[in-house]
Image (cartoon, helix red, strand yellow):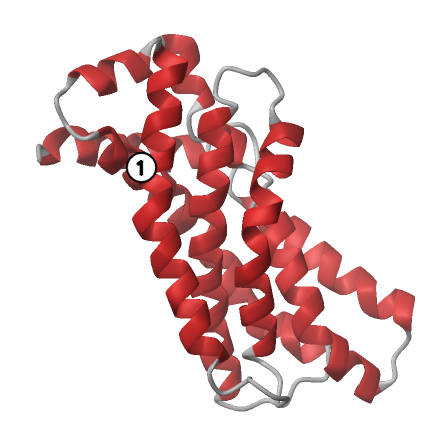
Amino acid sequence: MRPAPILSAFRQALGEAWAGGAGALLPLGFFAGAAVLVPLGIGTDPQTLRAVGPGILWVALALSSLVTLERIFQADTEDGALDLWLQTGAPASAIAGAKTFAHWLAAGLPLALLSPLLALMFQAEASTDLLRNAALYGLGGLAFYFWGGVGAALSATVRRGGLLISLIALPLYVPTAIFGALSMTHGPGSESAPLFLAASTLFALAVAPFAMAAALRLAAD
């Protein structure tokens, strides 16, 4: 494996994530906006907010991850950089994984860091569980970005491919969202849910880069 092209792809993706106005702040604003509006719509009953909060935040996290996914590979196909990446000899899966991970660092990790504050709006108790839940949001968000990267790679040659990315990625988000929300409740199966969440993320990290690489090779042909 050649590290230089992979590091170059990682650094380029970090810059792309912040390009175009607000850049990586767009998912943060979407995440916060969705979480703020829900309590206004369903009322202020503490028990209701506490019951629906985890599910609402996981749905908002999944949707927020879609906001900037178009940026991961589309520019590379338009300016010819994709062909250069594929000619470096570095594994295409490693390059795709590095670019996706960079976008998660720039746009996905801040969502997890914001989640404890938003959880308080849903009447969550101010305890160390908030930090644990933030780690779970970060773990699940990583899976969201890698599955979303598959959609971004498949739509790399499509102008304004946000809708296509959503159609491809959202079904892949379902297991992660279910296990993530379940891990923050106290119902049946909640104790083992974090393990299943971790397993779903590891599966995404193992499979998604190769799916992205295959899609990018098709886009380069």
Pointer 1 local density, CA inside 10 Å: few below 14, some 14–19, many at least 20: some
The one nearer the camera, 96 or 173, is: 173
The amino acid marked with disc number 1 is Phe
Counting from the top left corner in percent of width and height, residue 43 is at 91, 75
Which quadrant, please, contains the C terminus? top left
Eyeballing the image, is 168 above or below 112? Answer: above
Q: Quadrant of residue 213?
A: top left
Eyeballing the image, is 135 above or below 171? Answer: below
Could you tell me which residue is drawn at 72 percent across and 84 percent down?
A: 123
Counting from the top left corner in percent of width and height, residue 130 is at 53, 81
Whether residue 107 is visible to the viewer of this picture, yes or no, is no
Q: Quadrant of residue 10?
A: top left
Counting from the top left corner in percent of width and height, residue 215 is at 40, 25
The one nearer the camera, 118 or 210, is: 210
Mark 1: which secondary structure? helix
Counting from the top left corner in percent of width and height, residue 175 is at 55, 61
Could you tell me which residue is drawn at 45 percent across and 77 percent down?
A: 194
Which quadrant, please, contains the N terminus? top left
Eyeballing the image, is 45 above or below 82? Answer: below
| Residue assigned mark 1 | 210
Could you tell me which residue is drawn at 54 percent across and 70 percent down?
A: 179
Task: State left or right for residue 71 relative to residue 8.
Answer: right
